Structures are given as structure tokens and as C-alpha cells.
Image: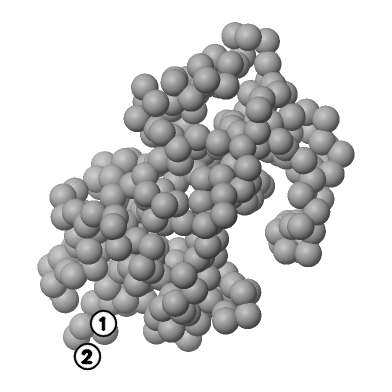
Amino acid sequence: MRNEIIELFKEEGLSKIGFVKLEYFKELEETYYLQYKYEYKTEFQVGNVDDKTFKNNTLFNSAIVVLMPYKRYSSNVKIDCAYVASSFCGIDYHIILKDKLKLISDFLLKLGFKAKICVDNNELDERYLAYKAGLGFYGLNHLLINEEYGTYFFIGVILTDAVFEYDEVKGEECLKCGKCIKNCPGEAIKGNGMFDGKSCVSYINQKKNMTSREERFINQCIFGCDICAEVCPHNDKVTICEDERVLIDVKNYKHMSNRNFNNKYKNYAFSWRGRNVFERNINIYKQKLEK
């Protein structure tokens, strides 16, 4: 069954697949689980199903983890054009990846197993599952790095009660050059191995409510941030492309109605935040250009 799943994914153009025994990972107790409980005032759950906590999970035995690469774009864009980070270009990855995962989910369901699809918007630490599946290693920037895709990939997970032969953590390590720490505009990446997510520019420019202090972090990349990925030497072999780039002529940008915004951008990953955040960031950057 494992080999059949691998072949099915390959038919969908996905070659990076790993299998993990689903359990309570004690090593995350003081980081991910604690943070989750603090932010959401609830115990950590698996896939938001019933009341079962991850520690006492009886719903699923395994996680099937897959990586889907995305295109890397250059930040060398003329100054009067704004753009969105590479991960937000093209059709929303939630849509594409969920469709590909559904093929495997249906396969498992037909065999009588449970199957739950998870793509980003769930409680799982998907990066850690991918790490445990041998699909990458952690960088100082807290991103997972794959030897072929660098950091330019999305992660999809299927939870199932099926049991497999499981993969192991690989031995590769980050070069620890420190470029991501030095170049992070919000100083979110700490030298002690910690990461302050609320200082990350990608977090800031996606917020609905922004302080005047946070406005100073709005730059030409109006949604998301690629800086720590751009400077990472592990991404040197990831090809830079120029097609399908979302570019906004800031000086000539005209206010859009919600309908026009949805008609133009509804299939892009950044559209979930809506027109208001998108236009707010454009206007802040425009004001900076005019000074």
C-alpha cells in the first residue's frame, strides 16, 4: 500500500513523500504545544476532530507527508511596482494541494481506512512532521529545507489509521551562515534559536489591525516576505523565474471594489485576507514612494 501511494503521488507530479508514526512528540512540549495552548486556550488536538488530544490520540496512526514545490521569483522589481511573496503567486496552493491529496484520501477510504486532509490551516506542526518524515532539515530561519527544493515548497498531510513502514529523520544540517538573522527586517529570527513570529514582516503585513510602528515594515513586497529565503545559500540552486508574477503599478493603482478584487485575485493565496489589507499595504508603500 505504501508503494501504491507513492506511485499515485508521482502521477500527480509529487515525488517527495514520507510516512510518520503519529504520536505525541514530547520534544515539542515546551515549544509548539505550549504555544498552541497559550494562543488558543485549548489542548492540542489532531486535525480538530472530536475531543481527543494529541497525547491521547486514538483516531489516527500515521501521517503521510508530501512536499509540493513552488516557483521562486526575484525581488529585483522596479521601485514603483509592488509585489507579493513567491508563495502567494499563482493559484492558491490550498486548492491545488488538497485536490492532489484527495486522490490518496479516496484511495485509503475505499480500502476502509480513515483519512483526513490537512493543508496549512490546521493545528498540526506540519514542518515537524515533514522533518520526521525525512523530507528536510531546519534552518536558522525556522523554515524546513529540502535538498532539492530549498525552502520553496508547501506541505500537505493526510492523517490515517493505516499503518506503514515509517521513514527516518535525515542527517543533513543547516550551514548556519547567519544570513537570515542579519537580513531579517523585523529581527524575528533570534541567534539563540528562537523565533518571534509577531515580529516577522510576513505576519505583520497580513494583519488586519496594524500599529503605526508596524507600518514602517511595509515595503515593496506588500504581502508575505521572501527575504530570509532569498539570502539562504540552501536556495542557491532553486531556479528563479519571472513568469506569472503578481505586480501592482503603485503610482497608477486605482481603488478596486470587492467584486473587482475577487474577480481578479480570488484564486490567489493572498486573497483570503481580502481587499482592505491588500489596498492598505499598497497605500502605505505609495506614501513612502512619494516622500
Of residue 133 and residue 107, the one placed in the foreground of this image is 133
Decide which of 201, 13 is in the foreground and name it: 13
Q: Quadrant of residue 37?
A: bottom right
For the N terminus, the quadrant is top right
Residue 97 in the image, given as x and y percentages of width and height: 43, 35
Position of 247 compared to 92: left or right? left
Reply above or below: 246 against 112.
below
Residue 291 got which mark?
Answer: 2
Alpha-carbon distance for marks 1 and 2? 6 Å
Quadrant location of the C terminus in the rendered image: bottom left
Q: Residue furthest toward the front?
A: 171
The residue that appears at 51% across and 45% down in the rendered structure is 135
Q: Position of residue 203 (x, y in %)?
A: 49, 67
Q: Are the residues flagged by discs 1 and 2 in contact, CB closer than 8 Å? A: yes
Residue 28: mark: none
Front-most of 129 and 98?
A: 129
Residue most extreme to the right:
56
Q: Secondary structure at mark 2?
A: loop
Amino acid tagged 1: Gln
Give the residue drawn at x 45%, y 41%: 67
Q: Secondary structure at mark 1?
A: helix
User: Residue 129 at what x, y percent from top left?
Assistant: 62, 45
Q: Circle 1 is placed at which residue position?
A: 287
Q: Name the amino acid type tagged 2.
A: Lys
Q: Position of residue 79 (x, y in %)?
A: 16, 76
